[in-house]
Image (tube, grey):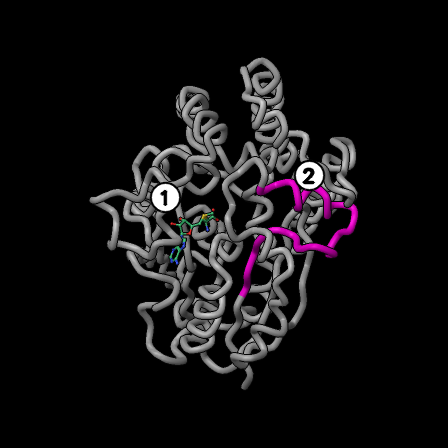
Amino acid sequence: MSSRLAQAVTRVAYGARQLPRVAWYVGHSLVLRELADTVPQSEKSKARRRVHTDAPVPDRKHIYADMAKLFLQDLANVEAGIYPLPAEHDGSLLTLIRRSRIFFDDLPNVHRRREARAHGEVLNEITRGTRPRYYLQNFHYQSGGWLTEKSAELYDTQVEILFNGSANAIRRQALPQLHEVFAGRDQRKLKVIDIGCGTGRFIDALKQVWPKLPVLGIDMSEAYLRHAKRYLRHRSRVNLSVAKAESLPAANESQDALISIFLFHELPPKVRRVVLRECARVLKPGGRLVLVDSLQRGDRPDYDGLLELFPHSYHEPYYLSYLDEDFAALAAKYGLVHVRDVNAFISKVMVFDKRL
Ligand SMILES: C[S@@+](CC[C@H](N)C(=O)[O-])C[C@H]1O[C@@H](n2cnc3c(N)ncnc32)[C@H](O)[C@@H]1O
């Protein structure tokens, strides 16, 4: 096949996989917006919806244009041979419809919590003391917090709707940063931990590039790990373990790379520090830490207002402090050198190497 034909085939195949996904999740967010206008709201809630910011808030067109840039970057990474054409493994149409139904069925519960600012349902006699207090909250007002099968079942649908179908593409922007340090090395001899791996979506992306790479996924949620185990059942050399990011189950200087996606904005400032110190402990000298998380204030001034407004609708108790956290300075305290930040739509990839 000529190289131009091969390029055309790749582009068509990429579009054929990503466009229906985006349409599916954008469709969900449009329905959500319609529903939000029809649901009765208390005066308090109406006032909250009118929360004002002086910072710029991008309109839909602006957001979609930036999302398109993310997908073009994703495709460029494929064309550069950094990773293969992504397989999304979303399940059959029936599975998607079933998840969509569960998502919409659960909306009244989320709405009730948002109205009442109720985020403490998961803290009860059974859970108290089993995990740190900050963890036992209904983040995003979601049912079951991080603790239940239902929450794990709903999670990926919720995240993809929030990101209009771009969550996996955002996660994949961590791969070039790993490619840079893994290139030319024997993948079977490398060690990687995904910290707060959730339902295992990023581990799946990792395995599409390096199928023989030994990966440990840790998370404090047993339910999410059970879900990840099922999702990754066809993958070899994957271990999943219930553990805290604050005390990783790994020896000093044993890991070649660590990755953590959408976790740090959910940690209290003090815990962020503990986790970064822990990352520095387990990384080999020269090892790489890749964090993927929300943009911070000032990364894209045109998004600052959107970032400020986000925690008013979703229970994100540590998000505002995250927006102004100086990760480069913080990491430096623990011997992690800031290599670069790369923006990825409304998220960014932060890269650190442990000092040699
Ligand atoms: C927003 S989700 C991100 C999941 C996944 N990384 C992704 O790409 O979607 C946060 C995850 O971190 C886990 N988590 C939160 N705090 C944690 C901690 N201190 N230690 C381990 N896992 C934690 C939660 O259980 C949840 O699965």
| Amino acid on which disc 2 is placed | Arg
Q: Nearer the viewer, mark 1 or mark 2?
A: 1
Residue located 20% across and 44% down the image: 126
Q: Is residue 101 above or below residue 2?
A: above
Cα–Cα gap, marks 1 and 2: 37 Å
What is the quadrant of the N terminus in the image? top right
Q: Is residue 34 above or below residue 259?
A: above
In the rendered image, residue 15 lying in the magenta stretch gets the answer no
Please name whichever residue, 135 or 196, is drawn nearer the observer in this view of the structure.
135
Q: Quadrant of residue 8?
A: top right
Q: Which mark is residue 146?
A: 1
Q: Which residues are magenta?
A: 290-311
Instruction: Give the class, few, some or many, for how many residues have Cα within 10 Å of label 2's Cα (few <14, many ≥20).
Output: some
Q: Which mark is residue 11?
A: 2
Please name whichever residue, 75 or 28, is drawn nearer the observer in this view of the structure.
28
Task: Tell me where residue 60 appears, x and y as whole percent.
Answer: 74, 31
Looking at the rendered structure, the secondary structure element under dot 2 is helix
Please name whichever residue, 76 or 41, is drawn nearer the observer in this view of the structure.
41
Residue located 59% across and 37% down the image: 163
| Amino acid on which disc 1 is placed | Trp
Q: Is residue 1 visible?
A: no
Q: Quadrant of residue 112?
A: top left
Looking at the rendered structure, the secondary structure element under dot 1 is loop
Task: Tell me where residue 59 appears, x and y as whole percent.
Answer: 77, 33
Instruction: Give the class, few, some or many, for how many residues have Cα within 10 Å of label 1's Cα (few <14, many ≥20).
Output: many
Q: Is residue 218 left or right of residue 56?
A: left
Residue located 47% across and 57% down the image: 267
